[in-house]
Image: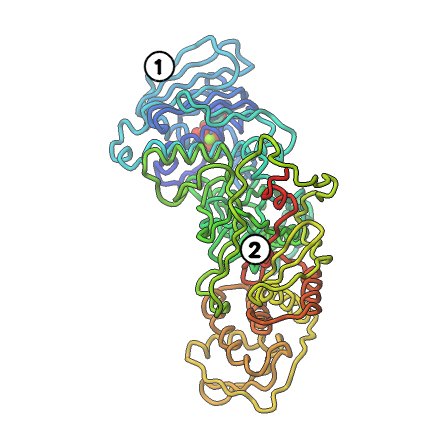
């Protein structure tokens, strides 16, 4: 791999000693990254006792020349940079020359390597940072590194290790996700006799997702495809303060930068309790980044309750000069030179794809009303993730954050159940007794023979399952349940639609469009409405006054902590006005205090829409129902209300047939 040079202090200073190796998973991460940097296409990883007893990684990469192999254990020696300047544009996964010496100082390490340029290989043995042996050996090409007895000489560290299963689950998750970033390579992960992952090269990410998670998980994911956005850099003559902070274009830099996003994310009905199912790669480096997490969250804004998270596998690629990877000891955080550009690109791309696919939640006969947010799993459900999580269960101890806090329900892929209205369900006020929508026992697997022939259902009459809600446009309303839910027959099966949230979605999009066009329909009040604000509300009011005006609320300060409302959006009735305004102020002081203008605007529009929407427990005649369904079909996001609740449930013909054992 060429000559290894000692790195200057700039890099070394940023790392506190020992931070590189925190736990077995960090050892695996560093070793994997080295193999990938060495161009390996076949990576075999073996782990015993949660990685403490043994971690071995064998690769078919370029190997090391003997001299380089010795240098690799010198601190801050790396073959991946030639110059300090390279630090601002790092294309490899490693760059500090920290990992091997750190790992060698807390374990017994055996390195076996041979470069194609040498006829014999090199075997080096190290224990607790001391070189015990260095000899010539007959070896195949590539590198094998075996790490035994991790932290044997650092008892304090050893004590902090979690259970074997927890450490193993971390390692499995890590290897899995690196395998997703490299569909063209083989990854084999073994723990003792158990094969945890074995994937062979495939041509596309989709095939790799299929290999790892199975077809059912794939069905609930949306593929981004390849989306790009070009950024124009300021000319070199523009000083950084006028252009973009801390970055100045060099005269020979190209004038534009391309950012590319690929990967998968889940439909809004997949709701996880935390961020553990979000995996973000920047230039194939697995990172945890707040900016990108936030961009992803914003994409789902108004489609998912604020407290739940999607599954996502995002690959962002850009010029290495656009991202500083040298800001965190274990390289898991990065800093973008043009953060807000990247943020908006990711948010817009995902939002666009969400709108394009307009998926409908399917009505699951097995859905239990007790089902809440799905337990957060690091992986979507599949045999594989189940296995990993089962491993985590054995010890009975499942650990802190980056772990799955609960086991997913046993059995097949659990249906993505619709969430019950989140509490407090202020806006849903059932005076009638609770609904019972009990479609009978779940279909119990495949029937081996037809029990009785009650008349054939012509197979061509079963439409292919359709995920898009565009089918809403030709729904035939049949009636209402509890004067709250519209039941409708469609091209493919039965639909149940929550009339309030459906109308809320329609109004929300209407108000947003009017707002964007600067043409909000306004209605003057006969008498101004005078409201008294708390000091806190007064501050929030001052902050959002402009946005309120643009949304159709004409307000004026009127003495101390009092405002007079003279006009309001036409959609809001005078009786509701006070509540809408207080609700907006409440959101503005809570979740939206640090939110962007865009989020604030959406919050205001959502409040208006919610107040103005048809309530539940309201009788609708057939023409009103038909109008509502039609208008819903025209919306961009007919699947969930602006607060993230589902709007429609779909019981497909196929599911109906299955339930009646006709297929
Ligand atoms: P870094 O990756 O930051 O350069 P490391 O301590 O991880 O530092 O590795 C030190 C050096 O050892 C690398 O720069 C590389 O030259 C060499 N090396 C490590 N692992 C491998 C491998 N699997 N194949 C080839 N070379 C390797
Ligand atoms: Mg490295």
Helix, strand or loop at label 2? It is: loop
Mark 2, other Cα within 10 Å: few <14 / some 14–19 / many ≥20: many
**Colouring chosen for the image of the structure:** rainbow
| Residue drawn 50% across the image and 33% down it | 383
Q: Name the outermost residue toward the bottom.
A: 527
Residue that badge 1 annotates: 133
Q: Quadrant of residue 513?
A: bottom right
The one nearer the camera, 449 or 114, is 449
What x and y, as percent, mark residue 453? Answer: 65, 37
Helix, strand or loop at label 1? It is: strand
State which tag comes first along the sequence, 2 or 1. Answer: 1
| Residue drawn 48% across the image and 53% down it | 308
Q: Quadrant of residue 402?
A: top left
Name the mark on residue 300: 2
Is 437 rendered above or below residue 18?
Answer: below
What x and y, as percent, mark residue 153? Answer: 26, 28
Please indicate, yes or no, whether residue 248 appears anywhere in the rendered image: no
Tag 2–tag 1 contact (CB < 8 Å):
no
What x and y, as percent, mark residue 505? Answer: 62, 64
The one nearer the camera, 482 or 188, is 482
Q: Name the outermost residue toward the left.
A: 155
- Left or right of 400 on screen, residue 321: right
- Left or right of 398 on screen, residue 66: right
Q: Quadrant of residue 645?
A: bottom right
| Residue drawn 66% across the image and 54% down it | 355
| Residue drawn 44% across the image and 46% down it | 375
Mark 1, other Cα within 10 Å: few <14 / some 14–19 / many ≥20: few
Is the CB of mark 1 within 8 Å of ligand 1? no
Q: What separation in Å lies between label 2 and label 1 (alpha carbons)?
A: 56 Å
Between circles 2 and 1, the one closer to the viewer is: 2
């Amino acid at each position: 791999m060429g000559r290894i040079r000692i790195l200057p202090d700039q890099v070394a200073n940023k790392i506190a000693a020992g931070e590189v190796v925190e736990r077995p998973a960090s050892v695996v991460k560093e070793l994997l990254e080295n193999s990938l940097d060495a161009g390996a296409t076949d990576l075999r990883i073996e782990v015993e006792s949660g990685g403490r007893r043994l971690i071995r990684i064998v690769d078919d990469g370029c190997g090391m020349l003997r001299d380089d192999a010795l240098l690799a254990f010198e601190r801050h020696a790396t073959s991946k940079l030639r110059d300090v300047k390279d630090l601002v544009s790092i294309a490899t996964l490693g760059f500090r020359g920290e990992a091997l010496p750190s790992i060698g100082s807390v374990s017994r390490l055996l390195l076996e390597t041979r470069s194609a340029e040498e006829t014999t290989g090199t075997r080096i043995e190290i224990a607790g940072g001391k070189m015990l042996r260095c000899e010539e050996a007959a070896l195949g090409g590539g590198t094998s590194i075996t790490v035994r007895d991790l932290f044997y000489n650092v008892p304090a560290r050893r004590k902090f290790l979690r259970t074997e299963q927890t450490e193993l689950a971390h390692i499995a998750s890590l290897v899995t996700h690196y395998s997703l970033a490299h569909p063209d390579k083989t990854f084999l992960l073994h723990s003792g006799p158990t094969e945890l992952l074995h994937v062979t090269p495939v041509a596309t990410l989709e095939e790799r997702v299929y290999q790892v998670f199975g077809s059912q998980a794939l069905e609930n994911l949306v593929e981004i495809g390849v989306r790009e956005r070009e950024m124009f850099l300021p000319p070199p003559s523009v000083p950084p303060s006028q252009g973009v902070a801390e970055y100045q274009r060099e005269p020979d830099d190209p004038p534009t930068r391309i950012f590319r996003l690929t990967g998968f994310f889940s439909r809004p009905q997949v709701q996880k309790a935390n961020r553990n199912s979000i995996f973000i790669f920047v230039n194939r480096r697995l990172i945890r980044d707040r900016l990108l997490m936030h961009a992803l969250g914003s994409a789902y804004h108004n489609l998912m309750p604020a407290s739940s998270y999607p599954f996502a596998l995002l690959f962002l690629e850009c010029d290495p000069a656009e991202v500083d990877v040298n800001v965190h000891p274990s390289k898991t955080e990065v800093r973008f030179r043009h953060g807000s550009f990247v943020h908006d690109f990711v948010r817009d791309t995902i939002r666009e794809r969400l709108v394009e696919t307009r998926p409908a939640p399917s009505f699951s006969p097995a859905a239990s009303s007790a089902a809440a947010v799905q337990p957060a799993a690091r992986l979507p459900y599949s045999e594989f993730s189940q296995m990993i999580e089962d491993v985590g269960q054995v010890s009975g101890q499942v650990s802190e954050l980056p772990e799955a806090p609960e086991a997913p329900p046993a059995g097949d892929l659990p249906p993505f159940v619709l969430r019950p209205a989140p509490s407090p369900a202020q806006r849903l006020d059932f005076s009638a007794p609770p609904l019972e929508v009990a479609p009978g026992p779940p279909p119990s697997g495949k029937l081996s023979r037809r029990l009785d022939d009650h008349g054939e259902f012509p197979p061509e009459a079963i439409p292919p399952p359709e995920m898009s809600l565009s089918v809403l446009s030709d729904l035939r309303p049949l009636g209402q349940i509890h004067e709250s839910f519209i039941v409708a027959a469609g091209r493919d099966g039965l639909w149940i639609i929550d009339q309030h949230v459906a109308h809320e979605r329609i109004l929300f999009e209407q108000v947003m469009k009017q707002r964007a066009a600067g043409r909000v329909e306004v209605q003057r009040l006969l008498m101004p409405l005078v409201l008294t604000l708390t000091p806190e509300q007064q501050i929030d009011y001052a902050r959002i006054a402009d946005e309120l005006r643009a949304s159709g609320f004409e307000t004026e300060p009127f003495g101390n902590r009092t405002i007079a409302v003279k006009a309001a959006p036409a959609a809001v009735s005078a009786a509701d006005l006070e509540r809408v305004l207080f609700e907006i102020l409440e959101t503005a002081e809570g979740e939206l205090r640090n939110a962007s203008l865009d989020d604030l605007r959406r919050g205001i529009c959502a409040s208006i829409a919610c107040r103005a929407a048809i309530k539940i427990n309201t009788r609708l005649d057939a023409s009103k129902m038909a109008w509502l369904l039609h208008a819903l079909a025209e919306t961009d996001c007919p699947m969930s209300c602006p607060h993230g609740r589902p709007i429609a449930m779909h019981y497909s013909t196929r599911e109906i047939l299955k339930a009646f054992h006709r297929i």
